[in-house]
Image (cartoon, rainbow, N blue to C red):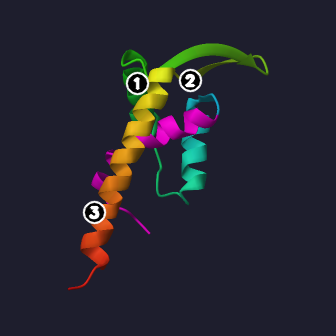
Amino acid sequence: MAVDRSLVSGSTTMLLLKLLSEKDMYGYEMIDTLAKRSNNIFELKVGALYPMLHGMVQSGYLESYNQEVNGKLRKYYCITVNGKKYLERMIEEWNAYRNAMNDVLYQTV
């Protein structure tokens, strides 16, 4: 099922932080993991991912480091303590939003 991109865009930062709270990842790994876990609902493009990651690094939510894998240098991202706190707040806000949406959509008078 195709989902309107405007519904997805506000959640992408939270989803990336969630992935990185589980383990350090490089860009294509994040794209692949997000697509697989969401049954391809969340399909990030490289051109959208890296500006978001750089913004989160500048905000202090992520750090990056280079690591050689099979003779290839990869840039990995890891979540910071501030990133974990920010993720917790985002999840709380998401849960409040989701609950309010469910109340409106599924409660009858």
Is residue 14 rendered to the left or right of residue 72? left
Mark 2 and mark 3 residues within 8 Å of each other at the beta carbon: no
Q: Residue furthest right?
A: 70
* Residue that mark 3 sits on: 100
Which SS type dominates the magenta stretch? helix
Residue under the point 60% across and 45% down: 33
N-terminal of the pair, mark 2 or mark 3, is: 2
Q: Which residues are magenta?
A: 1-22
Q: Is residue 91 visible?
A: yes
Is residue 31 rendered to the left or right of residue 93? right
Percent from the top left, x then y, of residue 78? 57, 24
* Residue that mark 2 sits on: 77
Q: Amino acid at mark 2?
A: Tyr
Percent from the top left, x then y, of residue 86? 40, 31
Q: Residues within 10 Å of mark 1 (few under 14, many from 20)?
A: some
Quarter of image, res 88 = top left
Residue under the point 30% across and 56% down: 97
The disc label shown at residue 56, or none? 1
Is residue 20 rendered to the left or right of residue 85? right
75 or 90, nearer to the observer: 90
Percent from the top left, x then y, of residue 67? 69, 15
108 in relation to 4, above or below: below
107 or 32, nearer to the observer: 107
Residue under the point 28% across and 75% down: 105
* Disc nearest the viewer among 3 and 1: 3
Which secondary structure lies at badge 2? strand
Q: Amino acid at mark 3?
A: Ala
Q: Amino acid at mark 1?
A: Met
